[in-house]
């Protein structure tokens, strides 16, 4: 340690990737809102949001703990390599965050607890077991991203309206993660990593990403067809999925631009669910 208590605290905060952790909590709140029961169970929503923030922060910290040797070469500015916090301190901090997440999750309904258990196990196992397996790490990241919405719905006891949002977010995130791997092929190959594009080829990896995104696009009208949301939902979600289609096509030749554009499409799709719920709640189905 070189900077005393203040530097250690700063390093601990950096481990959590606070922006990402808070964003994950916000997605859980959106899931509860889209499920339509947020006002009926505010304490459950607060516990679910808190559990998501803690679990995401713990996952980020444990990931840095396991990646500390690689980071000494590739990211020496990170908290552990630069000595702001010791590996043992980072591990203890992540455990404390996991304990906080579990404590909050145990106050929720059974389905939410089950989702939390699966997610916590996936977060712990990701770096050591899944990250190095071609495609598996992408699927885990996609599931975890989409499950924040599902967890929010489960926390208030109503997952049906968010199942499609979960699927849309998970599948599009997997596609984006594959494009990111295509973008990083040269560096990953130099480091001896066996990502999906390295294992099966860049074109095949892109085709798999496009196929998964196609499933998400085809599923996007389902909330309207089932009567959860009205036409306002379609007006917002269609530009979002159109942007995703453009993004995956662009990703064939320019994975950097494709995955960035795909992120914006995901945002529009999530916004469509919020707008759809607002419209359904205040005006009835259009």
Image (tube, grey):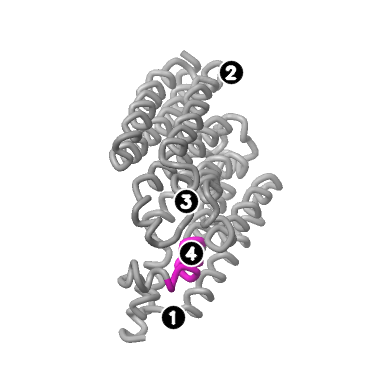
Other residues around mark 4 within 10 Å, as few (<14) / some (14–19) / many (≥20): many
In this rendering, the label closer to the viewer, 3 or 4: 3
Q: Main secondary structure of the magenta part?
A: helix
Q: Secondary structure at mark 4?
A: helix
**Quadrant the N terminus occupies:** bottom left
Q: Alpha carbon of mark 3 to alpha carbon of mark 4: how far?
A: 17 Å
Upstream in the sequence, badge 2 or badge 4?
A: 4
- Magenta part of the chain: 59-69
**Disc 1 versus disc 2: nearer the observer:** 1
Which label is found at residue 226?
Answer: 2
Q: Earlier in the sequence, mark 3 or mark 4?
A: 4
Residue at the image point whose x is 49% and y is 47% from the top: 199
Q: Which of labels 3 and 1 is toward the front?
A: 3
Q: Is residue 84 above or below residue 279?
A: below
Give neighbour class at mark 3: few <14, some 14-19, many 20+ (Cα, 10 Å).
many
* Residue where numbered disc 3 is placed: 195
Q: What residue did someone put label 1 on?
A: 86
**Nearer to us in this view, 81 or 7:** 81
Residue indicated by mark 4: 63
> Which of pointers 3 and 2 lies earlier in the amino acid sequence?
3
CA–CA distance between discs 3 and 2?
38 Å
Work out how far the residue at label 3 is from the one at label 1, CA to CA, in angstroms: 29 Å
Q: Is residue 65 magenta?
A: yes
Q: What number of labels is visible?
A: 4
Q: Residue at x 43, y 73 (%)?
A: 69
- Separation of marks 1 and 2 at Cα, in angstroms: 52 Å
Alpha carbon separation for disc pair 1 and 4:
14 Å
Q: Is residue 114 visible?
A: yes
For marks 1 and 4, the one nearer the N-term is 4
Of 47 and 140, nearer the camera is 140
| Residue with the most extreme top position | 286
């Amino acid at each position: 340690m070189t900077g005393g208590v203040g530097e250690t605290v700063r390093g601990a905060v950096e481990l959590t990737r606070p922006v990402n952790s808070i964003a994950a909590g916000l997605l859980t709140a959106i899931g509860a809102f889209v499920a339509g029961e947020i006002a009926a169970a505010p304490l459950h929503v607060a516990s679910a949001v808190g559990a998501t923030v803690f679990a995401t922060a713990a996952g980020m910290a444990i990931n840095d703990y396991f990646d500390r040797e690689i980071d000494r070469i590739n990211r020496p500015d990170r908290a552990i390599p630069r000595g702001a916090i010791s590996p043992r301190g980072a591990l203890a901090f992540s455990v404390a965050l996991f304990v906080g997440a579990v404590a909050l999750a145990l106050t929720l309904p059974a389905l939410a607890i089950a989702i939390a258990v699966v997610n916590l196990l996936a977060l712990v196992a990701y770096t050591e077991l899944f990250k190095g397996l071609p495609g598996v790490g992408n699927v885990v990241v996609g599931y975890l991203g989409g499950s924040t919405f599902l967890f929010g719905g489960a926390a208030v006891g109503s997952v049906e309206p968010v199942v499609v949002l979960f699927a849309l977010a998970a599948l599009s995130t997997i596609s984006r993660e594959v494009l990111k791997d295509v973008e990083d092929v040269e560096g990953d190959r130099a480091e001896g990593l066996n990502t999906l594009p390295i294992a099966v080829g860049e074109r095949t990896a892109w085709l798999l990403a496009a196929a998964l995104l196609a499933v998400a696009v085809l599923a996007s009208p389902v909330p309207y067809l089932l009567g959860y949301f009205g036409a306002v939902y379609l007006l917002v979600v269609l530009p979002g999925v159109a942007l995703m289609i453009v993004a995956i096509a662009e990703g064939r030749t320019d994975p950097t631009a494709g995955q960035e554009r795909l992120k914006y499409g995901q945002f529009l799709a999530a916004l469509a669910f919020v707008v759809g719920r607002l419209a359904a709640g205040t005006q009835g189905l259009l």
